[in-house]
Amino acid sequence: MVQVIEKQTGAAFKLQKGQKLKVIDPQGEQVSDMVLFNAEDPREKISSGKTLDFEESILITKGDWLWSNRSNKMMKILEDTNGRNDFLLAPCSPETFKIMYNNPDYHPSCFENLYTNLKPFGIEPDDVPTAFNIFMNVQFDEKGKLSVDPPLSKAGDYVLFEAEMDLIVALTACSAEDSNNGSFKPIHYEILD
Amino acid sequence: MVQVIEKQTGAAFKLQKGQKLKVIDPQGEQVSDMVLFNAEDPREKISSGKTLDFEESILITKGDWLWSNRSNKMMKILEDTNGRNDFLLAPCSPETFKIMYNNPDYHPSCFENLYTNLKPFGIEPDDVPTAFNIFMNVQFDEKGKLSVDPPLSKAGDYVLFEAEMDLIVALTACSAEDSNNGSFKPIHYEILD
């Protein structure tokens, strides 16, 4: 059954080893930040540094694994119809909008939407790692300069993951203007056995 | 006074706000992995995701700041005579040598050298984040493919940092063959007021 994450919100849930998670961009040009924790011991969690190291690539897609800080496989990417994801940048946070958008007022953020949804699992804000940013289109040039461009995803694009261990998963429908071309949208997901 | 980190070992120490830290490659072609924690509350620590986001670059050097998971500045880079550092890859760990070097035997690692030196500060292995890898030469192509090449640093190259808050700092002399062209060497450092 397809679950809906409304615009600028998030969700967290358990996923058992062997189950599949399909994350869908229903309208196109939207980003979903995803973090993973070992359901048995949440001090084990997704690691960008370990994933980029073991997969020997900045761009993580079909055929790659998402690795933990303890060097274990957490998920395999089985399908990726869009093919562009980011694993460099931290989830947008209140400070992102203050520092990068010059917006001193309250603004919803992926960071807030991750930690509030993870709270029932005993996970604190400081425990939220750099997320795997599904559909996020971060371009880099040969000098390493980064730019956040509109996602390349079209309506219906999805990424299909398979859990390699029992997991706590948190997902967002991204709250940052630059990440979704200024148009906030929902994200859909489906758990498949 | 110059402190010596012998080959394949590490060190950890406190650095007060306003103090400067000079990390020196005394012989050339050696890497030092550095992690930072807020001395008042070690749950605040260096974040690659926040740093790459706020500095809008993969390559972090002179004029940039190192940022924390709470979006605070931890250090400013005042000087960088070599200019190439890495902030993508996790510290080499026992699993690095098993998975990437096909070496099932014990091997010293930056991860072990970081967590053993950080233990007196109450910091556990799971708390060690992706390090700022001083002098590490990780090349990337336009498709994001990563390769760990010999460091470009020459004997005497250094990076000078200034602490933006009271810090716990851990440093290594890297234990991985690929990071230092197969020749393990020491790292020197100096704390300047």
Image: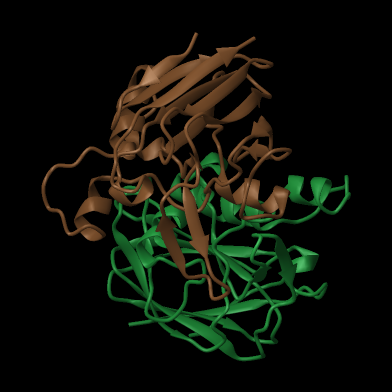
Chain colours: A green, B brown
Q: Dividing the picture into quarters, in which one does residue A142 lie?
A: bottom right
Image position of A68 with respect to A26: above or below: above
Q: Residue at x 61, y 43 (%)?
A: B83
Q: Residue at x 29, y 41 (%)?
A: B183
Residue B38 visible in the picture: no
Which of the pair A68/B36 is nearer the observer? B36
Query: In x, y percent, where is residue B51?
Result: 64, 46
Image position of B192 with respect to A62: above or below: above
Query: In x, y percent, where is residue B79?
Result: 67, 31
Residue B100 visible in the picture: yes
Image position of B118 with respect to A31: above or below: above
Residue A20 lies left or right of residue A137; in this view the side is left
Residue A175 lies left or right of residue A68; in this view the side is right
Q: Residue at x 71, y 48 (%)?
A: B55
Query: In x, y percent, where is residue A79?
Result: 43, 86
Q: Dividing the picture into quarters, in which one does residue A178 lie?
A: bottom right
Q: Dividing the picture into quarters, in which one does residue B163 lie?
A: top right
